[in-house]
Image (cartoon, coloured by chain):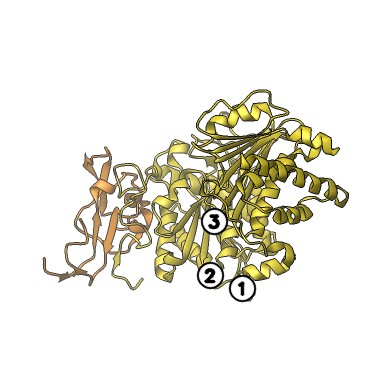
Chain colours: A orange, B yellow
Amino acid sequence: MEKKILEYPLVKIEPELCKGCGLCIDACPPNVLKFHSKFNTKGYHYAYYIDEGCTGCGVCFYACPEPEAIIVFKKGYEYSGEEVK
Amino acid sequence: MAEKVLKKAASFYDSYFRNPSPDKKMTHYCPGCGHGHIHKFIAEALDDFEIADNTILISPVGCSVFAYYYFDTGNIQAAHGRAPAVATGIKRAHPNSIVISYQGDGDLAAIGTSEILHAANRGENITVFFINNAIYGMTGGQMAPTTLIDQRTTTTPTGRNAHNEGYPIKMSELISQLQAPVYVERVTLYDNKQRARARTAVRKAIKNQVNNLGFSLVEVLSPCPSGWKMEPVDAMTWIKEVMVPQFPIGIYKDITKEVQPYVYAKPNPTAAEIRELIEVIPDTDTGFKRSVYPDQYRNPQIKIAGFGGQGVLLLGGALAQAGMMEDYHVSWLPSYGPEMRGGTANCHVNIREIEVGSPMVSNPTVLIAMNRPSLEKFENDVVENGLIVFDQSLIDSYVKRKDVEVLPIPATQMADKLGNTRVANMITLAAYAAYTGIFGKETLYTTLKTAIKKQRLLEINQKAIDTGYEFGMEKKKK
């Protein structure tokens, strides 16, 4: 996949690594993270990004206790699509 | 934060291969656990300061006992509460490494109180992260020393009562009263601002060590949603509303601007310097050539067992000493009951041409049994074609095994004839040395000089060596 420079910030949450604690949802200033109605294989309602409104502040990244569950891409990042497995 | 992406720190392993669970990407912590946050902050700081390859992290006992699953650093897991003591040793042996002690409140504030206080008081140049969740989280939420007044736990079902269980220990306040620590701060994780502060504190505490400033401690009021029986978000609110009023957050001590960096002048003395320091007498140290003796007796792993008072430990010590004089690698590990006489005593001795891996001898190649219970107990542990030496005058049975070599000595009788029953051990020693050929008589004589404390007993012990040696030589001929 070709690299593209992000024109807007992006947050990726890996559903299988989310434990559904909800801290990111509680912390998100623009309120753009929600619990998914589906379960992941661990049985948690995982958090997801509603695909609109992320400011790239990074608060959710530091609110999340899991090392790898959340990745925040800021505006201007060269996104190749391989960052998230 | 010039980086355009926030992702997993490189100081974490890519895949947590040490974790036996099939899921190698996820931590073992419960949802909403504060350990994850602190792990993240530490890993990020290690990345940013580029010190991960130089860092040794000490995991405690508690949920974070498995911190070594996650951090791609050097890792050691310490006994309960002993992380600061282990950190002290590591830092002194490796003064240029970054040593981080990561502990919970059951570990640091309960069983490890004295370790942390003294490490802090010595001003060890280490960084301590103290994760305070006010309970014993791993074992199911029992009361910890940091449990709040009126807090309900499984062991204080009606709430902690100050008259019965005392008040919560405030470690940051305590440690900040000491003179040596340079940086003590209490932070928490309950909202974005507090997490940012905690992140700053974690970075500063690590940076202090990089700059050789001294002891830093960061106490983190951290949620334990499972132990507190709350939702993760409610647990954060509980910290804010209940915990913080009793454990005020803030910087308790910061003298990092005033102290001078401490530079380790001379980290490790050389072997020659150590010899000089402890005054190893040169003429007893070396100078003996190793004897030539049959291969089957080489590299003996010896177990010596008997009653306390028979000189079992002295016999082992003398063997090891003799080995040292001939420049072997030796070890001596005593194991005995609290009694001075009577009771059982045994010791393990290695005399090796290569370095000794473990001082424990579970399957001896040589068993020296000084009484019957010892012979019966350890006979079957001896390796095939091993050697069993036993005191014939005290043991009225014989070795039952057929696949070992046996050397019975009437040591106690012989010692009686010499006029002192207690030299039976030296007779046995000399007989063993002569029979196998492992040590010459001269080595044994010199050993005596250091092994026997009372000089008036030297003569009788020398006689014992002579008698034993003669006996051993005779047996060898047969």
Query: What numbered label is drawn on residue B353?
Result: 3
Visible residue check, residue B421: no
- Chain for disc number 1: B
Identify the residue shown where x is 44% and y is 35%: B229
Of badges 2 and 3, the one in the foreground is: 3
Classify mark 1: residues with Cα within 10 Å, few (<14), some (14-19) or many (20+): few
State whether residue B372 is above or below residue B284.
above
Instruction: Evaluate if marks 2 and 1 touch, with contact meaning CB atoms under 8 Å apart.
Output: yes
Label whose residue precedes the other's in the sequence (2 or 1): 2
The secondary element bearing badge 1 is classed as loop
Q: Amino acid at mark 2?
A: Asn
Query: Where does the N terminus of chain B fall, quadrant-wise?
Result: bottom left
- Chain for disc number 3: B
Percent across and percent down for residue B477 are: 62, 42
**What residue occupies the far right of the structure in this picture?**
B456
**How far separated are the C-alphas under marks 1 and 3?**
35 Å
Identify the residue shown where x is 80% and y is 46%: B463
State whether residue B442 is above or below residue B110.
below
State whether residue A4 is above or below residue B9.
below
* Along the line of sight, the residue nearer the viewer: B431 or A55: B431
Label whose residue precedes the other's in the sequence (2 or 3): 2
The secondary element bearing badge 2 is classed as loop
Instruction: Evaluate if marks 1 and 3 touch, with contact meaning CB atoms under 8 Å apart.
Output: no
* Along the line of sight, the residue nearer the viewer: A47 or B453: B453
State whether residue B206 is above or below residue B79.
below
Visible residue check, residue B319: yes
Percent across and percent down for residue B225 are: 43, 41
Give residue B467's quadrant in the image.
Answer: top right
- Left or right: B174, with B49 as reference point: right
- The residue indicated by pointer 2 is B96
